[in-house]
């Protein structure tokens, strides 16, 4: 099915979980765009981040119907990021421990109808990215697409923080670009 969505618009999707098929309401809340330094912090192979920036997608899943989950969730598996209208990004993992508001889908030991969780994924993207698209699809389905414009934000004067929310390791601090809900609009597939 798939479709281009407005910022903040949710979709209904099904995921086959270990406990059975679950229906979720899904919405991409935002996509943060950091720097090469941010990407290097998450990478074991620091050279792989050379010339790339870090993008983090924040996707909220609300359990709508189906069995209560008693183990981790597979909801985020259908998520990816594309940049500037189509360039696919390289997924490098989940930054939950470093990113405020992100949870680890495999740490969810109980998930009941009506409960929501925000899962995040970290991706390597070109540093000159102007827009970030968060794609989510059911297994084998066409993606739903939320588009976020990337804005340059000045780093705060106090308590320097990089794009993942953790203190910077050095005195210098890079600027960060952030795409947030409310800045994007409809996008064509």
Image (cartoon, grey):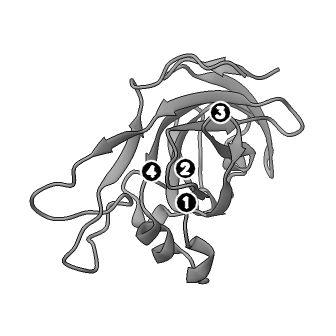
Q: Is residue 62 above or below residue 159?
A: above
- Of the numbered discs 1 and 2, the one sitting upstream in the chain is 1
Residue positioned 49% across, 75% down in the render? 40
Give the residue number, with chain letter if any, for mark 2.
119
Marks 1/2: CA–CA distance = 6 Å
Mark carried by residue 33: 4
The count of marks equals 4
In this rendering, which labeled residue sits more in front, label 3 or label 4? 3
Q: x%, y% of residue 88?
A: 71, 47
Q: Which residue is mark 3?
A: 85
Q: What crowding class fits label 3: few (fewer than 14 Cα within 10 Å), some (14-19), or many (20 or more)?
A: some
Are discs 3 and 1 less than 8 Å apart at CB?
A: no
Marks 2 and 3, the one that precedes in the sequence:
3
**Dot 2, how many residues are within 10 Å of its Cα: few (below 14), some (14-19), or many (20+)?**
many
> Which circle, 4 or 2, is nearer the viewer?
4
What is the quadrant of residue 46 in the picture? bottom right
Toward the right, the furthest residue is 140
Badge 4 density bin: few <14, some 14–19, many ≥20, Cα 10 Å: many
Q: Tag on residue 21?
A: none
What is the x, y in percent for residue 114?
A: 54, 31
Q: Earlier in the sequence, mark 3 or mark 1?
A: 3
């Amino acid at each position: 099915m798939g479709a281009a969505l407005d910022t903040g618009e949710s979709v209904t999707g099904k995921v086959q979980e270990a406990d059975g098929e679950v229906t979720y309401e899904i919405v991409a809340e935002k996509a943060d765009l950091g720097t090469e330094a941010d990407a290097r912090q998450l990478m074991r192979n620091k050279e792989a981040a050379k010339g790339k920036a870090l993008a983090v997608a924040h996707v909220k899943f609300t359990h709508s119907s189906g069995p209560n989950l008693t183990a981790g969730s597979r909801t985020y598996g259908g998520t990816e990021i594309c940049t500037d209208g189509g360039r696919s990004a390289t997924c490098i993992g989940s930054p939950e421990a470093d990113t405020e508001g992100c949870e680890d889908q495999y740490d969810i030991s109980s998930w009941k109808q009506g409960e929501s969780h925000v899962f995040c994924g970290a991706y390597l993207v070109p540093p000159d990215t102007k827009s970030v698209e968060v794609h989510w699809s059911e297994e084998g389905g066409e993606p739903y697409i939320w588009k976020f414009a990337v804005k340059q934000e000045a780093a705060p004067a106090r308590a320097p923080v990089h794009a993942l929310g953790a203190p910077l390791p050095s005195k210098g601090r890079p600027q960060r670009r952030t795409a947030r809900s409310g800045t994007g609009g409809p996008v064509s597939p």
